[in-house]
Amino acid sequence: MGDNMKWVYSFGADNAEGDASLRNLLGGKGANLGEMASLGLPVPPGFTITTEVCTEFYKNDRTYPEGLKAQIDAALIQVGESVGMKFGDKSRPLLVSVRSGARASMPGMMDTVLNLGLTDETVEGLATLSGDPRFAYDSYRRFIQMYSDVVLEVDHHSFEEILETYKEEHDYFLDTEMTADDWRTIISGYKKVVEDALGKPFPQDPQEQLWGAISAVFNSWRNDRANTYRRLHHIPESWGTAVSVQAMVFGNMGATSATGVAFTRDPSTGDNYYYGEFLINAQGEDVVAGIRTPQALTKESRLKMGDEEPSMEEAMPTAFAELCAVFDKLEKHYRDMQDIEFTIQDGKLWMLQTRNGKRTAKASLKIAVDMCKEGLITEEEAINRVDPHSLDQLLHPSLDPDAERDLVLTGLPASPGAASGEVVFNSDEAERLAQEGKNVILIRVETSPEDIHGMHAAKGIVTARGGMTSHAAVVARGMGRPCVCGAGDLKIDKSEAFFTVGGRKVEKGEVVTIDGGAGKLFFGAVPTVQPELSGDFGELMGWADKVRRMRVRANAETPHDAQVARDFGAEGIGLCRTEHMFFEADRIVAVREMILAEDKKGREAALTKLLPMQRSDFEALFKVMAGLPVTIRLLDPPLHEFLPHSDDEIEEVAKSSGMDAQKLKDRAHKLHEFNPMLGHRGCRLGVSYPEISEMQARAIMEAACNVAKETGEKVTPEIMVPLVAKREELAFLKERIDCIAIEVLKENGIKLDYLVGTMIELPRAALTADAIAQDAEFFSFGTNDLTQTTFGLSRDDSASFLPDYMRQGIFERDPFVTLDPDGVGALVEIAAEKGRATRPNIKLGICGEHGGDPDSINFVEGAGLDYVSCSPYRTPIARLAAAQAKLRKNDGGSTA
Ligand code: PEP
Ligand code: MG
C-alpha cells in the first residue's frame, strides 16, 4: 500500500468526497459530516483520515502508511484556503478540532480536542484578528487543558484546581467573568503544570500538536476503556477508528455565540419535540461538563423545567429557526431521530455532528411506531429499529406507587427504571461487589468513560453534576440502567465513606432505591411493581408477530411463570423442567426417598407419594396454557442437587421412609458422583429406574385427561426425554411411556394426542439424529448442555476462566449466552437436517438459554427450527428477534 491509496477524504465548503455510504471507511462521524455537507448544510470544512489508516497503523507497529502526510498537508491547505486561514500562520492561524470516529459510537476512546493549532505565537494572531483577546486566551487555555488531558495524559485535576483557586481568590463565580488577563495568568499556570509533569514544555509546533492528536486517537482504539466497551458491545477490533479534523467555529466569541447539543425527539420518552440544551459564549465541552447549567432549547421545555434563563428559541430566534429547519431536513433524510451538535458563531449556525440518537427502550419503541405512522418508515423498518435486548428495560419494574418512601434527593430524570442497592462511590468497587452478587447503586460526582465497567455492574447510577446530555445520562440510557444526574445537593465526602444531602447523611453500604424516571433517590428498599406496557409495545409486537415464522414458547414450571409467559405472548411451553417442581420442602423429602430407596419397592412407595403432586402440578399448567402445547421433560436432576447433606436432612428422609439413617447416609455416600454433569442424570435415571419415568408419564397423561374433561379444551402434552445419546435409550423409554399413555387414555375413555420426543443435548445425539428421529416425534435443542458437551466446558465452572478467554479474544461472546455458530450451531444444523430426513414433519425447537438471545434466534431461523423457547420475561425479546431474523433471511442473510 502506498502513494496511490486514498487515506484522506475532505468535506465542507460545498464539497464532500465521502458520505454516509462510506461509514466503514470514514467512521460514523466522518461519514455524517460528509453527508451533511452534501445535503448543503452548514458544515465547517475539514477532512477525515480513514479507518484503513488505523488498520495500517496497527499492522505496521504503530507507524503510518506512506503518502498519508502529504495527503493531510494538502487537505489542511485546502481547508485553510476555504476559510481564509492557514495552519500555523502567525496572523491568520487556522485552528482545528480533532475527533475520533469509529463505525459505531465508541465511548472510551480519545475525546475531542478543540482549538488545535494555538501556540504562544498564533494566539496573538487570533487575538488581533478577532479583536477579542479574551476569546483568544479563553480558547488557548481550553486547548492546553484538553490537549494535555487527552493527548499528553497530564492529570486534569491540576488544571481544574488552578482555575478554581484563581476564581475563588478573585471572587469570580463563572468562567465568563474571567478577563483576557485572567486567562493569560491561567495559561502560564497551565503551561507550568505540563512542564512539571512531562519535563518539557507544552508543544509549540502546530504540526507536532496535530500529529500528537491523531496518534492519540489511533492509540486510544486499543486502550483499556475502548477494549472493555468493544467487548461489552461485541464490536470487532478489526474495524478501527477514523479521525476527523475540522476547521474550528467558535461558540465562545461572546453573547452572539453559543454551542449546544440536541435531539430531534425526546430520547427519554420518544415524544416528538425538539429536545436539547445550549450555552451562550461557550465551547462544546462546557455543555456536557456540567459546570454551567445549560439553557433549554425551546420555550416550552424551559417553562416545563421552570428555568429562568431564556431558551434558545427566545434568545436567538433566527439561529433557532435555522436549526429547526436543519432538524427537519436531517430527520427526513436519515429517517431516524438525530443527535446533533451545533455551534453558533456570531449569529451563524454551524453543524458539527449528526448521528442516530441513542434512546431508551421506551423512546425507541415510540419513535419507531410514530415514524411508521408518520409514513417515514415501513412496519418492517420499525421492527428492525428496536433492539430486542432493549425491551428488557420496558419489562423492568418501577416503584410501587402506594409504597412509603423517604426521599434522599432529587435530580434530573436521566434514564428510567427503578432499582435498589447498596451505596458505592467508585466503579471498581461497584464491579467487585456486583461480582459477589450484590446489588449496588453507584454514586459519583460525575462519570467518565473510566466508569463504564462500574456503571455496567451497578443497578443504578446517581451523579451530582451534569445535565441530560452528560456522560452519565447518555451511557446509562444506552445501558438501560436507571440514572439520576445533576443532583446538585449531593455532596460526597472525600473519604468516600458517606454522602450528605442537606442535613442528612447516607453511609456507604446503606440500601437506597433509585427511580430514574422521576429523577429521585430514596432511603431503603422501596417495593416495585411490574410495568404496564404501552400501546406502542403491543403495536410493534403485533407487527413482529405478523412477520415472524418461528413460534415463541417459554420455559416455565409454575402456573405463575406460565401466566407471565402467556401475558407476554408465549405460544406454548417449550420446556417444563420437572426437577424444578421438587424443590419445595414437602416434596424434596419424597424425592430423596425415591433417589435413596434401596430397591424398587422402596422407590415405588416414594413414587406413590409424588404422583398426585406431579399430577396436580401438570393440571395447573395445562389449565393456564389453555390448549397451547406444553412440553414436559422427564426428570433430569443432577443428582448432587438432590442428595441430602446434613444429618437433619438424612433424619427427615429416615423418618418419612422408615429407612435406617446410617444406611441412608451410606447410600447417599455411594451415590456421590465425581462428575455429576456427566453422571447419572437425564434419561440414564429412567434407564436404571423405569418406574420413575412411568410415574411421570402417568402423572402427565392423567393430568391431561382430567383437564381435557374438565375444560372441554384440547390438551397437547409433549413428553420429552432428556440427555439422550443413543436411539436405544429413547426407544427404551418411549416404549414404556406409550404403554402408560395408552393405559391412562383407556382408563379415562378419551382420545388425546400426545407426542414423545427428545432433547438434543449431546454431540452424539446430533450426529445420529436420523436414527433418533425414528422414535422421536420432536427434537428440542438443549443448547446449554450441547454447548457444555461440545466444548467440553463445564456450565458450572467455566465462569471463573471464561473472562480470560474473552479478554484474549479467543471467545468474542460467552458461548453459554450466544450460540457458537461454528461448532454447536453446526451440530444443530446437522441434527435438524438428519431429523427431517427421517421424519420430514418432525417438530424442531430450542430450549437452552440461547432461545432468548437475539443472535442465537437469528441463527436458528437460518437452521429452519419451528420454535424457540425462553424464560417468560424474554418472550417479547424472542418475538421481536424472531421477526428480525425472518426479515434478515428474506433479505438474503445480510445483517441489519
Ligand atoms: C439445556 O441443556 O439446554 C437445557 C435446556 O436443559 P437444562 O438447562 O435443564 O440442562
Ligand atoms: Mg440440559
Image (cartoon, rainbow, N blue to C red):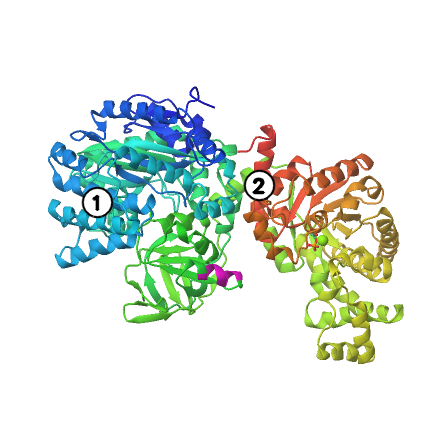
Badge 1 local density, few (<14 within 10 Å), some, or many (20+)?
many
Asked if residue 500 lies left or right of residue 555, the reply is left
The disc, 2 or 1, on the residue closer to the chain's N-terminal end is 1
Badge 2 local density, few (<14 within 10 Å), some, or many (20+)?
many
Instruction: Name the outermost residue toward the front.
Output: 199
Residue 575 appearing in the image: yes
The image's mark for residue 141 is: 1
Q: Position of residue 33 (x, y in %)?
A: 35, 30
The image's mark for residue 881 is: 2
- Given residues 160 and 643, the one toward you in this image is 160
Name the residue type under label 2.
Answer: Ala
Q: Secondary structure at mark 1?
A: helix
Q: Position of residue 159 (x, y in %)?
A: 25, 52
Residue 296 appearing in the image: no
Q: Secondary structure at mark 2?
A: helix
Q: Which residues are magenta?
A: 429-435
Q: Position of residue 731 (x, y in %)?
A: 87, 49
Q: Quadrant of residue 352?
A: top left
The question of residue 432 being in magenta is answered with: yes
- Given residues 122 and 652, the one toward you in this image is 122
Q: Residue at x 34, y 66 (%)?
A: 408
The question of residue 314 being in magenta is answered with: no
Q: CB at mark 2 closer than 8 A to ligand 1?
A: no
